[in-house]
Image (cartoon, grey):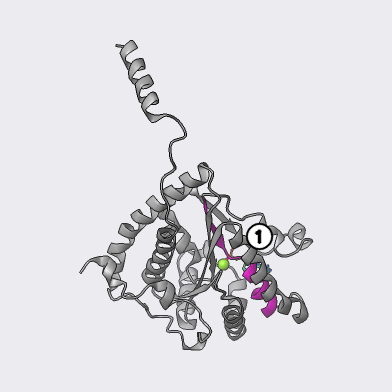
Amino acid sequence: MAAKDLWTTDPRIELRAGPDFDLAELDRNGQPGWEGDKDDGEAYLPERGEEMSELQERLYAEGRDDGTRSVLLILQGLDTAGKGGIVRHVVGMVDPQGVALASFGVPTEEELSHHYLWRIEKELPPAGRIGVFDRSHYEDVLVVRVDELVPEEVWRERYDEINAWEKKVVEGGTTIIKVALMVSYAEQGERLMERLERPDKYWKFNPGDIDTRSKWPAFQEAYADVFRLTSTDHAPWYVVPADKKWYSRLAVTEILTRTLEEMDLGWPEADFDVEEMRKALDALEESHR
Ligand code: AMP
Ligand code: MG
């Protein structure tokens, strides 16, 4: 069996948050759609990555030509869910020149003085790029809601506003892929503890992570609302079980690659006379002989 056939269903169908999606039912240690084991997954990842990388080069070439298309991968998930690992191990398989990475942390004073989408809009990928958001405007209905940083009537309005804004972005030529990495409570506990047990992991730990963990149920409720209210046809959510890192990386690679495949990316035509240029190069070689 070819490795690619170990995907028995398109993960974009398997993982998509549809109208009947129930976050409480999600098996966060699962591997929906992938029939192989960890070794199969780890073997297939670089193979698929190579295909993804070639498609990304085509997208980049199109953007250098006069294309207007781009891709935006939005990554959400609580601390330790593996957002950084996706950036390193999935996005890291393509040419960094073609990637536009942006991370969104606690807003600065200047950012707070603007509309919450202001800092997001500035980081949208230019034509030909794969934009990657490590956290995003969804924090404005997640941590902002859980920590009551704005009143409810303010964050309540944001779901519709986000849907409308994303629609505009898609109409501008950007394909949006929203990925939520969902780790289980037990696994998060272990990963946080590991950060406290290994000096090479201390830097990843933030005392605030304990506070966030203590609000687990409120975050789950806020995530459930995000999936319920913002998984649109133009920008659907893929909810990825994240207890198995090898699976979440494999699944995101597959979602990205399939999306790129469907964009039907060619190579730009030469905007010069190829034959004439060949002759000119030959003539130059002659003259130096
Ligand atoms: P990290 O991703 O570990 O670097 O952490 C970034 C931190 O910034 C997280 O604790 C987020 O909850 C927080 N953050 C991101 N966006 C916002 C926002 N709009 N308002 C408040 N906190 C935010
Ligand atoms: Mg963190």
Looking at the picture, tell me which residue is in the foreground, 89 or 216.
89
Residue 153 forms part of the magenta stretch: no
* Quarter of the image with the C terminus in it: top left
Question: Residue visible at 41% across and 70% down?
Answer: 248
Where is residue 154? Give x, y as percent: 76, 76
Note whether 217 is above or below 66 in the view shown.
below
Q: Secondary structure at mark 1?
A: helix
Residue at the left extreme of this rendering: 1
Q: Over which residues does the magenta segment extend?
A: 129-147
Ligand 2: quadrant of the figure: bottom right
Where is residue 96? Give x, y as percent: 47, 48
Question: Residue visible at 76% across and 60% down?
Answer: 109
The amino acid type found where label 1 is placed reads Ile
The residue carrying pointer 1 sits among few (fewer than 14), some (14 to 19) or many (20 or more) residues within 10 Å by Cα, namely some
Where is residue 105? Give x, y as percent: 64, 63
Note whether 140 is above or below 256 in the view shown.
below
Q: Is residue 14 left or right of residue 231?
A: left
User: Which residue in the structure is indicated by mark 1?
Assistant: 120
Which of the 4 image quadrants contains residue 51? bottom left
Where is residue 113? Give x, y as percent: 79, 61
The answer to whether residue 200 shows anywhere in this view is: no
Q: Is residue 262 left or right of residue 213?
A: left
Disc 1 residue lies near ligand 1 with CB under 8 A: no
Looking at the picture, tell me which residue is in the foreground, 3 or 92.
3
Residue 143 forms part of the magenta stretch: yes
Residue at the right extreme of this rendering: 113
The answer to whether residue 69 shows anywhere in this view is: yes
Question: Residue visible at 38% across and 20% down?
Answer: 280
